[in-house]
Structures are given as C-alpha cells and as structure tokens.
Image (cartoon, rainbow, N blue to C red):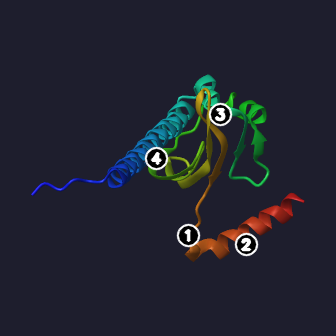
Amino acid sequence: MLKLISLKNLCSVFFLLGAFSTQALAEQGATHDKQQAAKVLDALNQYSSAADWDNYFALYDEQGIFIGTDANEHWDKATFEQYARPTKGWRYDLSSRKMTQHGDVIWFDELLMSPSYGVSRGTGTLIKTNKGWKIAQYHLSFPIPNSIAKSITKQIISASSNDE
C-alpha cells in the first residue's frame, strides 16, 4: 500500500537533509583549513633548516611574535628576523602535531626532534588572512620530564641569579 507523505513531513525531511549537508560542508572546510595550516608549519621547519629567511618570515603575520626557549626571547617579527638572518638556520623534524580550530584561528601543539636539542615542543596560533594561514604566535620550548624537573628548575634558578 502506498502512503502519502504530508507536506509538513516532507519539509522536515528536506530541513534535516540540509542540516546534515551543511554540517558535512563545515567539517570538510575545517579539514581543509587544518591541512593548509599544517602545510604552513611544515614549510616553517623546511625553510628554517635551509636558512631560507625570506620564505620563512613570509609565513608569519606582520604582527606575529616568536617566543623562544630563553626567558628573554619574546620577539616581534622584525626583531626575530634580525636574530635569525645572520644564522645558518636550525633543524626541527616533526614527531607529532595536534591542531584545534575555532573559526579563523587554529592553535597547535607539536613535538619536534632537533639534532641540537633533542625533543622540543612548538605551540602557537595561526590566523586565516586574505593571504592564507599565517603564524600569529610561535612558542618553542623544551618539555622537561617530571622525573628531572626539580633538578632542571634548580639549575634555571641558579643561572637566573647569576645573571643579575
């Protein structure tokens, strides 16, 4: 027996289908955004290891900042460029990365391996601009295992008091 569907029920079905397709499109957009942002971070590591400073700093927003491992390293883009350009670069290889997106902002946390320092952590924020994803903040740090944290922090305290 053929049942007729009411106009009200038909409209409800179309509404639900539209809601599902809108959600699917949003998820595809977020996946694409994260892929594009990941390419920016991958390029950052490639350019730094080649000391390709023009391309490296093009990945930063004009208002971007870099926070280094030393407590005194909180640099705007221009100051960071002055530090980096005379160097031969640095190498960090990606071990893992986590990214979270909220609108036109992505924050990330990545573990890196460095021939010079071993395990390092990069955290930061990318913003979506009319020129694509740009780094607004990058913070490089050394994750300290809890088992040696007190020993390391005592050394940091000692070094800080010697600097005064």
Q: Amino acid at mark 2?
A: Lys
**Residue shown at 68%/52% (left/top)?**
69
Q: Disc 1 marks which residue? A: 145
Looking at the image, the residue that sits furthest to the top is 54
- The location of residue 151, given as percent across then percent down, is 66, 74
Q: Nearer the viewer, mark 3 or mark 4?
A: 3
Q: Amino acid at mark 4?
A: Leu
Q: Nearer the viewer, mark 1 or mark 2?
A: 1
**Residue shown at 30%/53% (left/top)?**
6
| Circles 3 and 4: CB atoms closer than 8 Å | no
Q: Disc 4 marks which residue? A: 94
Q: Disc 3 marks which residue? A: 60
Kindly report the distance in space between the C-alpha atoms of the residues bearing marks 4 and 2: 30 Å
Q: Disc 2 marks which residue? A: 154
Closest to the observer: 143 or 38? Answer: 38
Q: Nearer the viewer, mark 2 or mark 3?
A: 3
